[in-house]
Image: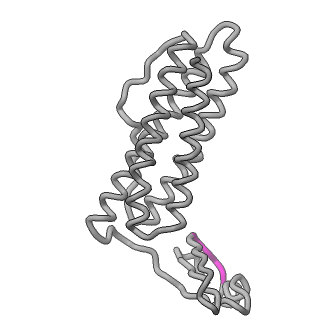
């Protein structure tokens, strides 16, 4: 029993519920049957080994665009957390550090999606310049612009995911999109 990349599709006997599991395993077939339970059928699915078609390439391209913005956000927010000065440091350092953590989670989620689709993840952040400043207002303005752009990219991803028929990934990206919208509103309120 060796470690291998696998996919499992659990289908309830009445074909209403479907669950997808992707990852690496050392499970035996008996252990996977136990995972499914007696009312579910297990279908083993081999993951895509390479990009299937032009739609996949377009989807992976857009996912890589989102990943680039998340990598940029990690750098920008870490930079701002370190450079904020004065009384605003008390309030904004934790906010910027929280945004770093959020962007790292989003980037990890997007990387996993790209790999699931058989694509190659970018390691480069978006090339948009990160403005160096110790002025809190300029930092918030730049944060607002970044969150707005990220939300736009995720908004453009949603119809592509819907068309691809990947409901799980659609739901995941929709949650990221809503998180970006909340960040936009938070930055807007801080700027008022």
Q: Residue at x 57, y 80 (%)?
A: 8
Q: Is residue 8 above or below residue 110?
A: below
Q: Is residue 90 above or below residue 26?
A: above
> What is the total number of numbered labels drawn onto the structure image?
0
Q: Is residue 130 above or below residue 157?
A: above
Question: How is the structure coloured here?
Answer: one colour
Q: Residue at x 73, y 87 (%)?
A: 37
Q: Main secondary structure of the magenta part?
A: strand
Percent x, y of residue 86: 67, 7
Q: Is residue 34 left or right of residue 69?
A: right
Percent x, y of residue 184: 54, 33
Percent x, y of residue 3: 58, 76
Percent x, y of residue 57: 30, 61
Q: Quadrant of the N terminus?
A: bottom right
Spot the residue most to the left.
Answer: 54
Residue 14, picture quadrant: bottom right
Q: Is residue 148 magenta?
A: no
Residue 109, picture quadrant: bottom right
Residue 104, picture quadrant: top right
Q: Is residue 96 left or right of residue 56?
A: right
Q: Please tell me which residue lies in front, 63 or 140.
A: 140
Q: Quadrant of the C terminus?
A: top right
Residue segment shown in magenta: 23-27
Q: Residue at x 49, y 20 (%)?
A: 141
């Amino acid at each position: 029993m060796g470690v291998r990349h696998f996919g499992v599709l659990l289908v309830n006997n009445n074909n209403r519920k479907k669950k997808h599991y992707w990852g690496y395993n050392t499970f035996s077939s008996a252990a996977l049957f136990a995972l499914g339970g007696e009312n579910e059928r297990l279908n083993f699915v081999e993951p895509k080994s390479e990009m299937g078609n032009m739609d996949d390439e377009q989807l992976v391209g857009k996912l890589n665009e989102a990943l680039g913005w998340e990598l940029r956000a990690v750098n920008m927010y870490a930079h701002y957390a370190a450079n904020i000065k004065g009384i605003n440091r008390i309030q904004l350092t934790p906010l910027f550090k929280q945004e770093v953590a959020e962007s790292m989670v989003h980037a990890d989620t997007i990387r996993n999606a790209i790999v699931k689709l058989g694509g190659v993840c970018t390691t480069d952040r978006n090339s948009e310049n990160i403005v160096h400043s110790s002025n809190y207002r300029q930092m918030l303005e730049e944060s607002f612009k970044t969150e707005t752009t990220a939300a736009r990219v995720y908004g453009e991803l949603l119809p592509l995911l819907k068309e691809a028929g990947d409901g799980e990934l659609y739901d995941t990206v929709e949650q990221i999109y809503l998180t970006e919208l909340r960040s936009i509103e938070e930055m807007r309120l801080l700027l008022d």
